[in-house]
Amino acid sequence: MINNINSDIETKVLVQHIYISVFKAQRIINQIRGRSYEETLMILELMPYWASYPILKLVYSAAANASNNMDLNETNLFISKAEVNRGAIFKKSGPRVLGHSYIIKKKTCHIKIILKELKEK
């Protein structure tokens, strides 16, 4: 885990309204916070959770933005900040017996990842 690295160059990625519960996403984000980019990819690819796939796509996107837009090397990147916030709850109704209905609640979350570059000494 990489801590207390001061770097001015950072890449931010925010994705909103993903159909993942906040608690399920938080379990994965806690594992990758503060790790290097390559180590994060290995962890996310080997995790047995379904929710790790959208987060893996988000990390890929952040690294692609860093390499294309800011000319940063992907091997020197690490995840400096990762947070999960609760999003809106979408409600729809489903059929029930005898013409009744019930509400299906789809929980969403917002995930924000910030990548920074390691400064070489």
Image: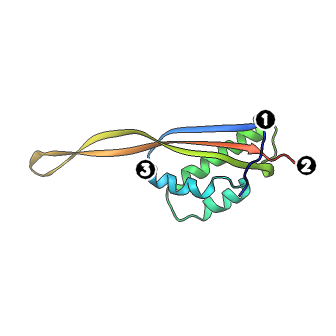
Earlier-in-chain disc, 3 versus 2: 3
Tag 1: residue type? Met
Would you name the residue on which mark 1 appears? 70
Number of marks in the image?
3
Which residue is nearer to you in this view: 6 or 118? 6
Earlier-in-chain disc, 2 versus 1: 1
Mark 1 lies on a secondary structure that is loop
Mark 3 lies on a secondary structure that is loop
Residue 63 picture quarter:
top right
Tag 3: residue type? Ser
Q: CA distance from mark 2 to mark 1?
A: 20 Å
In the figure, is residue 59 to the left or right of 22?
A: right
In the figure, is residue 99 to the left or right of 116?
A: left
Mark 2 lies on a secondary structure that is loop
Q: Residue 81: which disc?
A: none
In this rendering, which labeled residue sits more in front, label 2 or label 1?
A: 2
Q: Position of residue 67 (x, y in %)?
A: 77, 41
In the figure, is residue 31 to the left or right of 100?
A: right
Residue 10 picture quarter:
top right
Q: CA distance from mark 3 to mark 2?
A: 41 Å
Q: Position of residue 87 (x, y in %)?
A: 43, 39
Picture residue at 64% right of the left edge, 48% below the top: 59
Label 2 neighbourhood size at 10 Å, few (<14), some (14-19), many (20+)? few
Q: Residue 21: which disc?
A: 3
In the image, farthest residue toward the top: 69
Tag 2: residue type? Lys
Picture residue at 46% right of the left edge, 55% below the top: 24
* Quarter of the image where the N terminus is located: bottom right
Would you name the residue on which mark 2 appears? 121
Which residue is nearer to you in this view: 117 or 6? 6
Label 1 neighbourhood size at 10 Å, few (<14), some (14-19), many (20+)? few
In the picture shown, does residue 94 fall above or below 28? above
